Amino acid sequence: QKEVEQNSGPLSVPEGAIASLNCTYSDRVSQSFFWYRQYSGKSPELIMSIYSNGDKEDGRFTAQLNKASQYVSLLIRDSQPSDSATYLCAVKGDFGNEKLTFGTGTRLTIIP
Amino acid sequence: DAGVIQSPRHEVTEMGQEVTLRCKPISGHDYLFWYRQTMMRGLELLIYFNNNVPIDDSGMPEDRFSAKMPNASFSTLKIQPSEPRDSAVYFCASSHRSAGELFFGEGSRLTVL
């Protein structure tokens, strides 16, 4: 079982709709969770972080965390063509363990 | 402010040759990470440093790989001898305190023929 799992996609969403990206992780002691966006040929960039159960909103982005289910999601509202990218879920371990483990990413395409 | 700077951006070499990748982290960041990205395996952590000291090198594939951080502003990843399966994009990233908020360089694309 992979430590961090994502559906590789591709996920196609019409412009203006909500894109929903999902991620599960295997290590129950994981404390911190992140979503990175990577455009084709570019490096990953951080877009959201979440540390406690529930929802965290930042503009059009909402991260959701459920530690009991070991599940993290990212919602993108009012999807724009510029949101087309690969979204990487990343998980950090217990306190003192600075290792950040990435999923293989979900490729998202917003259809105009 | 300058971001993480990596060099070279592209490297094409022949099997058996030595490859050295270089990284300058963001000033003031105390963590430095080397990742490798391939289509098949995604982003894999090779090694990370805290205050120039290697903390976890469990991701380094084998003895052909080595990494150093002689000071706070410079790190190298060396592959000797290189093999075709080492072909990948190698990213350097740095962070301050919280290791989850990484700032990545533009990457070094390595092709080993």
Image: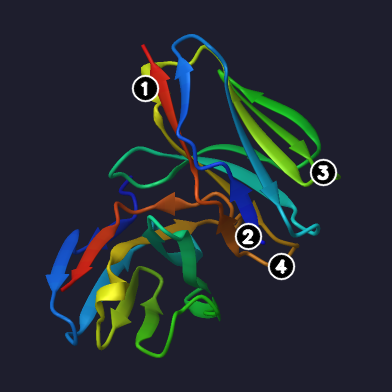
Labels 4 and 3: the sequence-earlier one = 3
> Residue A96 bears which disc, if any?
4
Instruction: Answer whether labels 2 and 1 touch (C-beta < 8 Å).
Output: no
Q: Is residue B18 above or below residue A16?
A: below
The amino acid type of the residue labelled 4 equals Gly
Choose mark 3 or mark 1, whichever is in front.
3
Instruction: Answer whether labels 2 and 3 touch (C-beta < 8 Å).
Output: no
Tell me the quarter of the picture where residue B77 sits: bottom left
In three-dimensional space, the C-alpha distance between marks 3 and 1, rounded to whole angstroms, equals: 31 Å
In three-dimensional space, the C-alpha distance between marks 4 and 3, rounded to whole angstroms, equals: 23 Å
Q: Residue at x 39, y 59 (%)?
A: B37
> Residue A82 bears which disc, if any?
1
Q: Secondary structure at mark 4?
A: loop
Q: Name the one closer to the observer, B21 or B51.
A: B21
Q: Residue at x 38, y 80 (%)?
A: B67
Q: Secondary structure at mark 2?
A: loop
Q: Are marks 4 and 2 on the same chain?
A: yes
Residue B75 placement (x, y as % from top left): 35, 73
Q: Residue at x 51, y 75 (%)?
A: B59
Q: Residue at x 37, y 22 (%)?
A: A82
The amino acid type of the residue labelled 3 equals Ser
Choose mark 2 or mark 1, whichever is in front.
2
Q: Is residue A13 above or below residue A39?
A: above
In three-dimensional space, the C-alpha distance between marks 1 and 4, rounded to whole angstroms, equals: 36 Å
> Residue A69 bears which disc, if any?
3
Quadrant position of the C terminus of chain A in the picture: top left
